[in-house]
Image (cartoon, grey):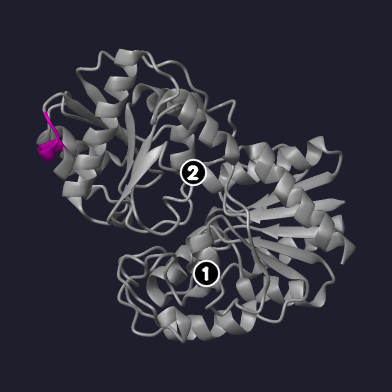
Amino acid sequence: MRIIQINTVYDKGSVGRITAGLYDGIEKKGYHSFVAYGRGKRSPNSNHYKSGNLLDFSLHVLKNLFLDGSGFASKRTTKNLIKWIEERNPDIIHLHNLHGFYLNLELLFEFLKKSDIAIVWTLHDCWPLTGHCAFFDYVQCEKWKEGCSRCVQYRSAYPYALWKDNSEKNYINKKQIFTGVRNLTIVTPSRWLKELVEHSILKEYPVKVIANGIDLSSFSSKIKSGDGKSFTILGVANVWEKRKGLEFFDLLAESLPENYRIIVLGLSKKQQKKYQNKFPSNRLLPLTRTESVDELASFYRQADVFVNPTLEDNFPTTNIEALACGTPVVTFRTGGSGEALNQMTGLIVKKGDIVKLTEAIIKVCNSIKDNQAREDKTKRFSVPICRDRASLFGQEKMFEEYLTLYKELQCN
């Protein structure tokens, strides 16, 4: 069996790490594994294909900025990619994120419709369902169900446009391009996104839920040695855009008791400077993004509670990474953010409610303090309980579910 994955990046960010994990898993099973990606350094691995270059990427970005044309440039790049795919004659093509300014949707799907290759398409956000936005929950928009137009987010939501709202035409084009592909199966990491797909332009396709998985050996736990008197709260994001809820850490820094310290990881230099000027480091420590998985895991292990105040999300792997490091999670009831948790490993509160968010954090920390006093490792929010929950979302389990799907599609 020959399997090609296509994604914006490889081994960077949550989706890039998922792509890399699947690539390795396919190889270990003795199958032929390939991956094509649009951004990042060119890999020396002959089974990796870097699609496009800086010039093509820049031109695609400009088309989007001025014409709201994400996914409708990069023609030469996509023709070269299709040639590379044909040379490898895959049994399965596994699509991930197609946005990211590296593909032409019309050319790629024209090729997919003509081929007899089985297609798996994992949706990591809502971009394929809309005329512009990757998420729409935050603004409570439902135009995507019937037809996008007059997008209220075309300037503020990824992929950002400046001068033109082309959402109506994009929606019509996407519907025409994405429908009518033989032997295509949609995968969503969350039940929440599955329900959206079933009411979208992609509703003709079967939808299967396969939760995101992480490398449990990289995100491992150790017994925490807190003093029960002070607590560390951690927030992590790849990019702290508005929908990720960064503003709630400002409010938490003002509302939590003095013995609580907040660490926010993944900030831009500009965001970091803002917090350095606003809060002392013993109250809120602002840090830029780390590319080291080991360093990221160490931050999770330092924390007593991982707080994810996301206002719209699919199935964030940060929640699983925290649990794997023995850290309970507090998050808003939004999208699929709470689907990795149960009542023993985290609390889910009403979206945007800072009072309930603060109360939940204090409640978790008080429970941790009681567990430490009793030396009880079997209680709610304890390290072993969190780690046990994370084991349900390991990379190996995710891979086995995808492998089963690949084999089913190959037999059809």
Q: Is residue 372 magenta?
A: no
How many neighbours does mark 1 have within 10 angstroms: few (below 14), some (14-19), or many (20 or more)?
A: few
Q: Secondary structure at mark 1?
A: helix
For mark 1, what is the residue? 195
Identity of the residue drawn at 16% across and 28% down: 283
Tag in front: 2 or 1: 1
| Secondary-structure class at tag 2 | helix
Q: Decide: is 123 above or below 394.
A: below
* Image coords of residue 67 (percent x, y): 42, 77
The quadrant of the image that shows the C terminus is: bottom right
In the image: residue 268, left or right of residue 402 = left
Q: Amino acid at mark 2?
A: Thr
Q: Quadrant of residue 395?
A: top right
Q: Count the labels in the image.
A: 2
The amino acid type found where label 1 is placed reads Glu
Residue 225 vs residue 111: left or right?
Answer: left
Q: Is residue 201 left or right of residue 249?
A: right
Towards the viewer: 160 or 391: 391
Q: Position of residue 387 (x, y in %)?
A: 51, 29
The residue at the point 83 percent across, 38 percent down is 29
Number of other residues with Cα within 10 Å of mark 2, as a class: few under 14, some 14 to 19, many 20 or more: many
Q: Which label was assigned to residue 120?
A: none
Q: Residue at x 60, y 44 (%)?
A: 18
Q: Is residue 287 above or below residue 401?
A: above
In this rendering, does residue 292 appear at all? no
Q: Magenta part mainly helix, strand or loop?
A: helix
Quadrant hosting residue 41: top right
Q: In the image, which residues are magenta? A: 253-257
Return the residue at label 2: 317
Depth check: give the residue in front, 389 or 155.
Answer: 389
Note whether 54 is above or below 10 in the view shown. Answer: below
Q: Is residue 255 magenta?
A: yes
